[in-house]
């Protein structure tokens, strides 16, 4: 019985020991935590306060000068009783270690901060502040902020004619159409938009007939009369390369019955006249003989009148009155009767033809169709690919750019409706008027149109109003008048020539019986160049700075491009004069270009391109595939941070 009681007691003791083994660690840990919890809480509070203090100190250091925080590394803040400063390494005080890690910030193409890739932003720094302690419990706290130079943000701007004139030009020029712009081209002493005093020469055409047609090449102008039968149907004018040029009538031809011509086209040795002679609707004139003689002709079947003519290579193209036909004829030889190749019926009389590549563009004398496009890739089988109604009046003239993407059409006066149209002909089978690409010429009824370098369209006409109007068409969606000429007589035709030496002229034929032929000077920017470079002057702030953003403003008409590079270098012997510039794109290499607003690459290797740096320049690279269009460089803003 006693043994039984003893065994029971032993079991109870073992149970108690087991329970104590389980509970004692918990009780002891709780006692320790309770004892150390308050000190740990105090350390955390001190560490958090230290982070807040360090943040404010870093802002103060940044405000004292960006260079104070521009070097990456590990630091701690110190105070000398007057100002804050950075010292290398971490610092421990009251058991709390504080460190400040400064590092670069990278941004992608949309300027968003990224961990990898992108480019370094020289005006933003990442500041990682860490506080740590070892007792009573090892712990650390980290807080990150980003500091920028925004307190000293500044800009360098070039936007006026005076600004741009300080740079250098290679195939470019400065114009002042809206305060100052850089465009392709050089030369031309006049201004397309200010032709008021730009009639530099005139010529009285023999006889009483009014000159009705004109076409020109450099140094030569070919004219025809068609108003009546009282004059010479064809005249050849030589234009000297003087300044101002001197026109001289060097030859005429009159053996046409009736002696009238409605259209004319000229080459170096031959002229082609669209006549009302039913036996030779196209007369081919040999300009190498003295006097001029007819060497060949084209006599299409039917009782017709020749209205317009255009020659491309060994093929001639004409339009007729009766039958409203468009016809092609063989010019592999100029002599004798030239055989017809093909024909197609138009919606009306073809008042004007313009050939570009494998297409003919015809301004049609019809109130329902003013423009027709004809595929002439096979001259023996021309095919109309599209017809377009532009207004409720007749088509008068058409001009096409060199890339075959735009047709410029004028129609007869239509009251308050537009008479000038910019037509997108990229899709030949579905041409469309550019949105907003129209203009009302007022009381003037247009007879001709030409587009000249610098993005200008010249419209001439009759019936009153301003008969010589110049439009700025760089913004195709909003053509606007930039100048004009009050000619007291009707103007019946226009052509324009860009001379090899940089001079630019338009030639007009008018109803002025004393001076039917007039020369108007254009420019600057008159000379066509397919590419050019504008290089700015050096911007020297006087001290090194970080350049942040390159912000160009420009207009790009169709078939043009504009891109930029910049150069930032350190001075030599304390001066920016004589430094060697290395132009780079947004990645800091010579192989890329700025084409929009982009960050400027950071590079601080003490060699070549440098950012931060002191000596800043930029280049603008212009390109066009169309002599009538140029990129328009309007303004540049460079954001920098001292």
Image: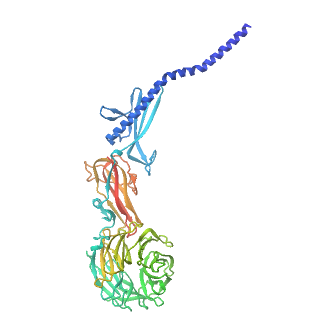
Q: Is residue 252 above or below residue 119?
A: below
Q: Is residue 375 above or below residue 613?
A: below
Whether residue 319 is visible, yes or no, is yes
Between 39 and 561, the one nearer to me in the picture? 39
Whether residue 335 is visible, yes or no, is no
Q: Residue furthest top?
A: 2
Q: Is residue 157 left or right of residue 477?
A: left
Residue 553 in the image: state x and y as whole percent.
37, 59
Q: How many marks?
A: 0
Query: Which residue is at a point 40% across and 53% down the rendered structure image?
Result: 598
Query: Which residue is at a point 29% across and 61% down the rendered structure image?
Result: 161
Residue 366 in the image: state x and y as whole percent.
46, 80
Q: Is residue 55 above or below residue 538?
A: above
For the N terminus, give its image quadrant: top right
Q: Residue furthest right?
A: 1
Residue 287 in the image: state x and y as whole percent.
34, 85
Between 10 and 412, the one nearer to me in the picture? 412
Residue 587 in the image: state x and y as whole percent.
40, 52
Query: Which residue is at a point 39% across and 28% down the rendered structure image?
Result: 92
């Amino acid at each position: 019985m006693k043994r039984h009681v003893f065994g029971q007691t032993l079991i109870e003791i073992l149970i108690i020991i087991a329970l104590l083994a389980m509970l004692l660690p918990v009780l002891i840990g709780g006692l320790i935590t309770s004892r150390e919890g308050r000190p740990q809480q105090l350390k955390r509070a001190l560490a958090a306060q230290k982070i807040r203090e360090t943040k404010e100190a870093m802002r103060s250091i940044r405000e004292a000068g960006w260079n104070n925080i521009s070097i990456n590394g590990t630091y701690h803040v110190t105070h000398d009783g007057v100002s804050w400063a950075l010292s290398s390494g971490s610092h421990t005080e009251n058991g709390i270690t504080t460190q400040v890690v400064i590092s670069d910030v990278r941004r992608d193409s949309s300027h968003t901060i990224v961990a990898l890739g992108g480019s370094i932003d020289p005006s933003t720094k990442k500041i990682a502040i860490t506080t740590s302690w070892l007792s009573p419990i090892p712990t650390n706290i980290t807080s990150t902020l980003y500091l920028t130079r925004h307190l000293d943000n500044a800009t360098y701007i070039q936007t006026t004619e005076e600004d741009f004139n300080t740079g250098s030009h290679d195939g470019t020029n400065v114009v002042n159409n809206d305060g100052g712009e850089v465009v392709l081209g050089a030369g031309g002493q006049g201004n397309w938009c200010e032709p008021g005093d730009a009639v530099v020469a005139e010529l009285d055409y023999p006889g009483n007939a009014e000159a009705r047609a004109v076409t020109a090449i450099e140094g030569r102008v070919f004219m025809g009369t068609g108003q009546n039968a009282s004059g010479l149907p064809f005249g050849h004018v030589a234009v000297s390369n003087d300044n101002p040029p001197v026109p001289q009538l060097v030859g005429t031809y009159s053996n046409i019955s009736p002696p009238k011509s409605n259209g004319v086209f000229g080459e170096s040795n031959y002229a082609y006249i669209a006549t009302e002679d039913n036996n030779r609707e196209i007369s081919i004139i040999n300009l190498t003989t003295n006097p001029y003689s007819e060497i060949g002709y084209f006599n299409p079947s039917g009782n017709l009148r020749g209205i317009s003519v255009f020659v491309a290579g060994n093929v001639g193209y004409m339009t007729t009155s009766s039958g409203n036909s468009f016809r092609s004829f063989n010019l592999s030889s100029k002599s004798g009767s030239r055989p017809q190749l093909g024909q197609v019926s138009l919606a009306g009389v073809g008042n004007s033809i313009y050939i570009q590549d494998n297409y003919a563009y015809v301004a049609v004398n019809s109130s329902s169709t003013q423009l027709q496009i004809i595929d002439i890739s096979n001259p023996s089988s021309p095919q109309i690919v599209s017809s377009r109604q532009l207004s409720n009046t007749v088509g008068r003239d058409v001009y096409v750019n060199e890339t075959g993407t735009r047709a410029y059409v004028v129609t007869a006066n239509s009251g308050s409706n537009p008479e000038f149209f910019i037509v997108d002909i990229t899709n030949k089978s579905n041409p469309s008027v550019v949105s907003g690409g129209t203009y009302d010429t007022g009381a003037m009824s247009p007879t001709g149109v030409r587009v000249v370098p610098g993005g200008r369209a010249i419209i001439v006409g009759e019936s009153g109003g301003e008969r010589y109007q110049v439009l700025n068409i760089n913004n195709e969606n909003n053509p606007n008048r930039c100048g004009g000429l009050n000619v007291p007589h009707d103007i019946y035709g226009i052509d324009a020539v860009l001379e090899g030496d940089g001079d630019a002229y338009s030639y007009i034929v008018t109803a002025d019986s004393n001076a039917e032929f007039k020369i108007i000077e254009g420019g600057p920017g008159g000379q066509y160049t397919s590419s050019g470079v504008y290089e700015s002057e050096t911007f020297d702030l006087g001290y090194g700075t970080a350049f942040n953003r390159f912000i160009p403003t420009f207009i790009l008409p169709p078939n043009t491009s504009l891109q930029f590079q910049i150069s930032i270098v350190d001075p030599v012997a304390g001066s920016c004069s004589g430094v060697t510039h290395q132009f780079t794109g947004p990645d800091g290499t010579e192989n890329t270009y700025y084409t929009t607003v982009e960050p400027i690459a950071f590079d601080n290797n003490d060699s070549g391109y440098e950012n931060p740096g002191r000596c800043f320049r930029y280049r603008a690279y212009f390109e066009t595939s169309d002599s009538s269009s140029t990129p328009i460089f309007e303004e540049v803003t460079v954001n920098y941070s001292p």
